Image (spheres, grey):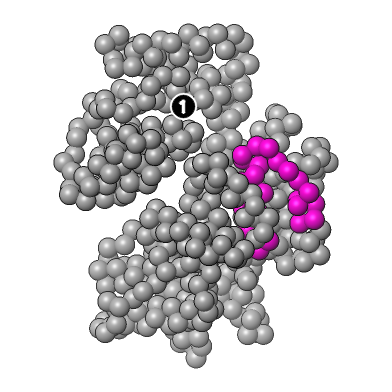
């Protein structure tokens, strides 16, 4: 539906390149012209990390995502770059229209294409935009029906974004209204179930999926999500029954193969996981960081160690903080303990303004970021900020108690485990209260949620929600 942004530059103000940014940008463009889109995207992501304000790099990366078929990611970058720049970046209108057309959001595509058309016939993509408008006019004969479908899909994307940002109640409200209005829109049921699961309402989450499977027998996402719920509840019989059911499924859609492979990997069934994830890899599937994480993990545990390590290098290239945290690292539990001890030592030294002699020899990514945050106040890594905020809360509430050191050390052990499992930390005070409750429970001591709610200035419902969330994630 039109050519992409390659040699043409946008009208945005060009920010001077730093040497490293120029290096990554040139390598990315070289890979692009050689037809290696996946490699080009990796280098341009690095260029963007070095200088996040360069609009031209972001737009080029967005259009590579379009060519890779990742239209949602492309749109996200285009909208962000328009929001962050004071001047108009006209070409973005056409690129958004093009992406929305590929996604089937014809009303949204029409809106952006019309906006680009109003800029005039001298714009770089005026001819392509006119062709797109004509095509959209043909495909959108029933404009009211087209608009309703677009709005439904846009609402779903908004709900997904809310889930990713931890806004579970807002997502639930949107999804329940969608289901009420469109009772056969099956993906809304799955997302609604996930929202309740993330809040710790596991029984409610399972109930939604069971109802969905009554209405839409064999819904793959529902079967996979239900399997994951059983796994986190440590219900081995239900997990085994689910695996036997899933292993007989042979999906044709790429999305379904990815979901099936990732589900098998998450529950530790690595042979079928590798089968489906590697089949996508061989087809040239341009997956996200999660895809390569599970591909590396399942490859390693099925005996494909060299391939696993090669894929892991790719994970680290995209996210340098993952270096040293391979899922197959030997003596993982011992590493967690040692890392937690070093984090505790760093925290105590900072609290008492003492030097920490070994702070420049940290190996684990979370330890390096902890040093930057505690001693140099440089990190933008939200996980580390939340981790130490919770530590501050626990320290404040337990400072006069004999077990002050024990609960802090145990918190850092839990933090390292959650970090290695790539789990984001939610509301800080809620998480601190939940860990406090579970820690006491593990010591066979009693502390009520109501008393913790008063202590942490929270509602008892909030404490209960985070206790359930943290309890589900305990290994």
**The C terminus: image quadrant:** bottom right
Q: Residue furthest bottom?
A: 402
**Residue 430 horizontal side relative to residue 65, left or right:** right
Q: Can residue 81 be seen in this view?
A: no
Q: Which of 209 and 288 is in front in this view?
A: 288
Residue 212 image point, x, y percent? 77, 41
Q: Which of 398 and 206 is in front in this view?
A: 206
Q: Is residue 22 above or below residue 344?
A: above
Residue 21 image point, x, y percent? 23, 47
Q: Can residue 386 be seen in this view?
A: yes
Write down the region rendered in magenta. 243-269
**Residue 37 horizontal side relative to residue 198, left or right:** left
The residue lying at 53 percent from left, 51 percent from top is 291
Q: Mark 1 = which residue?
A: 99
**Residue 78 horizontal side relative to residue 290, left or right:** left
Residue 251 lies in the magenta-colored region: yes
**Residue 231 horizontal side relative to residue 363, left or right:** right
Residue 137 lies in the magenta-colored region: no
Q: Which of 402 and 85 is in front in this view?
A: 85
């Amino acid at each position: 539906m039109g050519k992409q942004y390659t040699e043409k530059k946008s009208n945005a103000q060009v920010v001077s390149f730093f040497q490293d940014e120029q290096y990554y940008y040139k390598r990315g463009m070289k890979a692009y012209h050689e037809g290696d889109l996946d490699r080009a995207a990796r280098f341009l992501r690095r260029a963007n990390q070095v200088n996040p304000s360069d609009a031209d790099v972001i737009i080029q990366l967005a259009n590579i995502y379009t060519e890779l078929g990742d239209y949602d990611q492309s749109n996200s970058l285009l909208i962000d770059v328009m929001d962050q720049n004071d001047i108009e970046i006209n070409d973005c209108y056409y690129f958004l229209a093009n992406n929305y057309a590929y996604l089937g959001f014809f009303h949204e595509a029409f809106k952006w294409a019309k906006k680009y058309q109003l800029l005039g016939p001298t714009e770089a993509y005026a001819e392509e935009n006119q062709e797109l408008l004509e095509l959209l006019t043909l495909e959108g004969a029933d404009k009211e029906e087209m608009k309703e479908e677009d709005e439904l899909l846009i609402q779903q994307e908004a709900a997904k974004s809310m889930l990713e940002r931890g806004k579970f109640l807002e997502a639930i409200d949107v999804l329940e209204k969608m289901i009420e209005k469109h009772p056969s829109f099956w993906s809304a049921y799955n997302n609604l179930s996930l929202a309740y699961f993330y809040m710790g309402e596991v029984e409610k989450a399972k109930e939604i999926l069971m109802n969905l499977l009554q209405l839409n027998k064999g819904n793959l996402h529902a079967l996979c999500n239900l399997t994951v719920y059983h796994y986190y509840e440590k219900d081995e019989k239900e997990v085994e029954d689910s695996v036997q059911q899933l292993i007989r499924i042979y999906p044709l859609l790429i999305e379904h193969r990815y979901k099936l492979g990732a589900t098998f990997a998450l529950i530790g069934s690595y042979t079928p996981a590798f089968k489906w994830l590697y089949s996508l890899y061989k087809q040239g599937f341009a997956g996200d960081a999660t895809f390569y994480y599970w591909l590396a993990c399942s490859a390693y545990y099925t005996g494909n160690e060299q391939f696993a390590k090669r894929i892991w290098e790719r994970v680290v290239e995209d996210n340098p903080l993952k270096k040293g945290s391979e899922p197959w690292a030997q003596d993982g539990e011992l590493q967690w303990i040692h890392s937690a001890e070093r984090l505790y030592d760093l925290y105590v030294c900072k609290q008492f303004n003492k030097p920490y002699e070994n702070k420049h020899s940290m190996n684990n990514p979370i330890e390096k970021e902890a040093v930057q945050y505690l001693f140099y106040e440089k990190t933008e890594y939200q996980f580390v900020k939340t981790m130490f905020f919770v530590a501050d809360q626990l320290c404040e509430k337990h400072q006069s108690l004999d077990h002050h050191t024990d609960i802090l050390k145990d918190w850092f052990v839990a933090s390292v485990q959650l970090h290695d499992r790539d789990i984001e930390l939610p509301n800080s005070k809620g998480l601190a209260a939940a860990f406090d409750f579970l820690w006491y429970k593990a010591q066979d001591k009693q502390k009520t949620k109501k008393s913790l709610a008063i202590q942490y200035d929270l509602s008892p419902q909030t404490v209960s929600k985070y206790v359930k969330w943290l309890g589900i994630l305990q290994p």
